[in-house]
Amino acid sequence: MGFEPESRLVDERVESRINTLTLEQLEVVRRGAEIIKSGGLVAFPTETVYGLGANALDAEAVRRIYETKGRPSDNPLILHVSSIEMTEDLVEINWRARMLMERFWPGPLSIVLPAKEIIPPRTRGGLPTAAVRMPDGAVALALIKFSGLPIAAPSANISGRPSPTDAETVRRDVGGKIPLVIDGGETRFGVESTVIDMTGEHAVLLRPGGLAKEALEAELGEEVLLPQDQKIIKRSPGTRYRHYAPEIPLILAAPGEIPQDAQNWAWMGIAEPNGAPAKKVKFRDAEEYARELFRAMRALEKSGVSVIYAELPGERGIGLALKDRLIRAAGK
Ligand code: AMP
Ligand code: MG
């Protein structure tokens, strides 16, 4: 009831995004949609990172995603949608979840809800729940809409490597194994979506990401719990794995904490480091740090330095997601 006007607002946002595509881009997206419909894999840009997509309802297509990435089969995929209507076929939507969809979609928010039978167990890593998200990117939205299917898509990198934030990196990681990589330039956020569990009494933040915890709390009018805050431990299977790691050691350090005898080291952070790094990547603020993090890790590992010292940011806003990725990259 009363909800429809809001759903239509989401539809209008989607339309306005898709309307920005050029004829050339539309042509490529149409080709992508044909591949998705026939069970193939397409890499495409979203506002967070590049995704490696396939028809979420086709268990065989989804198997190929896992195979191509070398992803553990118990790490479930996020289903990308282009309308709330499409979402209703996939999961049981409660009113609080709907509120979040209407407020934050399209955007970097994945919502975990009870799954309907139509989603093959392989897509959801065997869980009774599934994560759904509407990405905020013209190419991504058009690809989903034109194929008329929810698209299961993890990041388009080999498992364990930093997520790709441009098409060139995608081509290097998986390019030879899939028929199409759609180039949409550099991604806007650079870190993955926030994952929130809305299946229980309390909202639980399973993974910090592009949308700030504070924004979710303001909309819900309640505290969003962290997995460690609750008695019944809810976890995101993916958060068990070492992730996002560069090939050289990454050590978390405050600017004044770099060892005197450090040799051939790189600095990555917002503050100025003490000492003389061989390479320095400095960011204006936490937003830029997040957007450039994965690209900086990939660039530094190839630059000839032996170790990266990285500054740990505060937890406000995007800082929480940034901190999470850095801790994982450090292998902690
Ligand atoms: P990625 O696609 O690599 O960004 O990872 C997707 C994230 O969403 C992983 O951390 C998954 O564990 C998480 N996820 C997907 N589906 C579910 C679910 N049903 N329950 C909890 N977490 C999920
Ligand atoms: Mg990933």
Image (cartoon, rainbow, N blue to C red):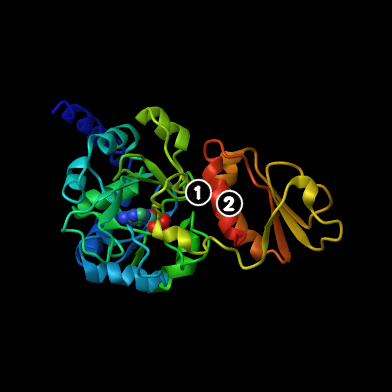
Name which residue lies at 20% across and 61% down.
Answer: 57
Q: Amino acid at mark 2?
A: Leu
Q: Earlier in the sequence, mark 2 or mark 1?
A: 1
Q: Is residue 125 left or right of residue 262?
A: left
Closer to the camera in the image, 142 or 120 = 120
Q: Quadrant of the C terminus?
A: bottom right
Task: Give the amino acid type for the residue marked by disc 1 in the picture.
Answer: Gly
Q: Say the numbered circle drawn on residue 203.
A: none
Looking at this view, name the residue that lies furthest to the right. Answer: 260
**Cβ atoms at labels 2 and 1 below 8 Å apart:** yes
Residue 138: image location, x then y, percent: 33, 44
Q: Is label 2 in a helix, a strand or a loop?
A: helix
Q: Which residue is mark 1?
A: 190
From the image, tell me which residue sits under label 2. 293
Res 273 visible = no
Instruction: Please state if 225 lies on the left or on the right of 125 as rendered.
Output: right
Q: Residue furthest left?
A: 1
- The answer as to whether callout 2 falls within 8 Å of ligand 2 is no
Picture coordinates of residue 290 (x, y %)?
Answer: 55, 46
Relative to residue 61, is residue 196 depicted above or below?
A: above
